[in-house]
Amino acid sequence: MSFTKRTIRGQPLRTKIVCTLGPASRDQGMIERLIDAGMSVARLNMSHGTHAVHQETFDAVRAGAEARNRPIAVMVDLCGPKIRLSEIEGGSLTLATGSSVDFVRGVAPGTKDELTCSYDGFLDDVEVDEPVFINDGAVRLTVVRKATDRVTCSVDVGGVISSRKGINLPGTRISSPSLTDKDIRDLEFGVGLGADLFALSFVRSAEEVKDLRSRLQALGSNAQIVSKIEKPQALKDLEAIIEASDAVMVARGDLGIELPVETVPLHQKHIVRACHEALKPVIVATQVLESMIEHPTPTRAEVSDIANAIEDGCDALMLSAETAAGKYPIEAVETMARVCRDVEKVLTVKAAPEDFIGRRAGDALRKAMVIGAAIIAEPLGAKFIVVRSESGVTARYLSKVRGHCPILAVHHEASVLRRHALMWGVLAVQTTAEHGELPPMEDDLRQLARSILE
């Protein structure tokens, strides 16, 4: 029995790193460097780029992963019902504080008097006294009058707006479904690629997650679903959303616009804890290393943010513009990996046996075996805990214990191993054995360990 050789030098990285690929990072050479630096998941953001560009990027990821012998997962991030300004005459304009501006139907270029947006239902959904935020809340309006063909807003906080900038309606119940026509086209494209994960944006209920699951199954895909928590409505249905999802993302950007920004840290902790209790991976995203878009080193606050997220129990951290369009994509991943490793050195087993077994998710027998393995591994001096991976459930349970030993998930199919890409502390190892069999004898287990460590 033989195994694909995977060499691990130094301390294995337990926290997973998700990298958004873009102009700064989409060629195979850069992707291989990102893998070497610590990337586990490559994110394709469907808000930007064409299908042709994403196809090239996907192919480069698969080629780079094969060259580096790493099961790198690909996540297709669906746009969802993101509302954006239409084109602005001249590209940008300034809305003065105290002035007023109308939103009208259609797609005509916007002026300082009349604006249009990408969402056809805007005029129908908004109501008087509801806020309208533009450009991540930098410009703030309030609806003061509503008519059939226009909505008039007062400009409470003025500023520069430009073409295609985002619009948030924190007080408005949006009638648009979570999957737009564009999302459905992107979903079909992503399934055709063979994407491993799909991120569902602006989730409001578990039913929306179930709808995406049904669509994936109808397309013949068993890809995992990552639900992005960025709407206040999602917090009200959080447990059901987590239960319906394979993983969750704390999307702090839009969440911090839809809700008072000072509440975001507590919501983040609550979401991470809820995912931990449900034994589901959770990603913390947005502005994690924002300063490294322009600078080669992070701020102290960013480093503390990473450390606190890991201490809270997040499984993965995501980089967006830092790797997609920043000046220092490799340095950003290397920085994150260094911070993660330093924090991971002082983490201890997070779950007492009775606490872990008593959680609502999963069967008690499997969890009892998992907690037992995690506890005895350290005094025995074990280097790894090895599990045969098929569904990934046992590895996911072990991951949530936060034990000291890295977890080796072994299988012969790379597609199965990529399902572990968001699991904290899980290292995926591809075997040449059929049916993903583990070595039956102690000597074969030692052969596996030597092939990895030497």
Image (cartoon, rainbow, N blue to C red):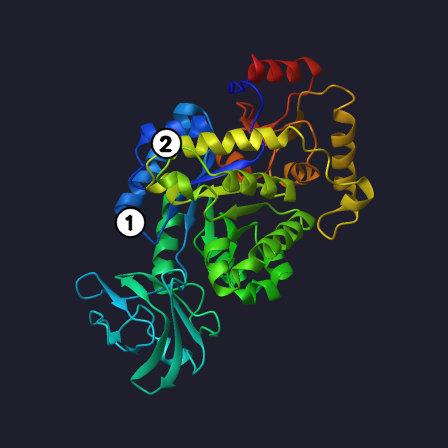
Q: Of residues 250 and 390, which is closer to you in this image?
A: 250
Residue in view at x 46 percent, y 59 percent? 254
Q: CA distance from mark 2 to mark 1?
A: 17 Å
- Residue at 52% in and 64% down: 259
Q: Quadrant of the C terminus?
A: top right
Residue 283 on image: x %, y %: 54, 46
Is 386 located above or below residue 322 in the figure?
A: above
Residue 391 visible, this orientation: no
Residue 248, position as x, y percentages in the image: 55, 51
Label drawn at residue 31: 2
Alpha-carbon neighbours of circle 1 within 10 Å: few (<14), some, or many (≥20)? few
Q: Amino acid at mark 2?
A: Ile
Determine contact: label 2, label 1, CB under 8 Å: no
Q: Secondary structure at mark 2?
A: helix
Residue 325 in sight here: yes
Q: Which mark is residue 49?
A: 1
